[in-house]
Image (cartoon, helix red, strand yellow):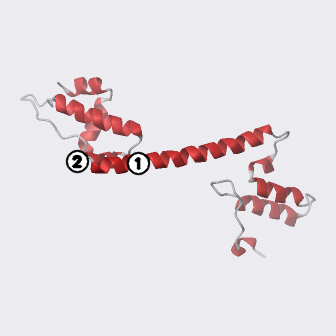
Amino acid sequence: MRIGELAALVGVSTRTVRHYHHLGLLPEPARRVNGYREYRLRDAVALARVRRLAELGLSLDEIRDVLADDQGRELREVLEDLDADLARQQAAIAARRERLAGLLAGPDLHPDSTVSPDLAAVLRDLPTGDSPFGALDRELLTLVDTGADGAARPASRSCSGR
């Protein structure tokens, strides 16, 4: 079969097949007299395997490593690592959604609502007068609250500027 037939059979584009050849994920098949690649069933199986691993979320480098290991010993490790990574992502997303639900359940939203709950409590207690230093303190505290988990981060002495 030709490249277009192989690609259609597995559900990828011909460009993807060529890219996988370029990266070494698929071996170059024999060529016909007219220069066209001649794919066989084993090429379709190999391409389908690459596609399934990519759909699971493996990077192309990880796929290359897995395919290079004839006995598949590394596949279990790679898939376990991927599963653990997905579990961490799922937990992080659940935590973000919980925080978002808490924000949306509140009666009124304002810019300070998006900071961590601990920092929001601190900002509520700060005076909101016309003091330029008070405004600067609020901005610096908000800047410090940049942790990925939503928790307030303590300011370092070098950030205080005083």
- Quarter of the view holding residue 38: top left
Q: Position of residue 71 (x, y in %)?
A: 22, 47
- Residue drawn at (23%, 36%) of the image: 46
Q: Is residue 10 left or right of residue 111?
A: left
- Viewer can see residue 61: no
Q: Which residue in the rendered view is the most extreme toward the right?
A: 129
Residue 38 relative to residue 87: left or right: left
8 left or right, relative to 41: right
Which quarter shows the C terminus? Answer: bottom right
State whether residue 87 is above or below residue 131. above
Circle 2 crowding by C-alpha within 10 Å: few under 14, some 14–19, many from 20: few
Residue at numbered disc 2: 71
Residue that mark 1 sits on: 80
In three-dimensional space, the C-alpha distance between marks 2 and 1, rounded to whole angstroms, equals: 17 Å
What type is the residue that disc 1 sits on?
Glu
Amino acid type of disc 2?
Answer: Gln
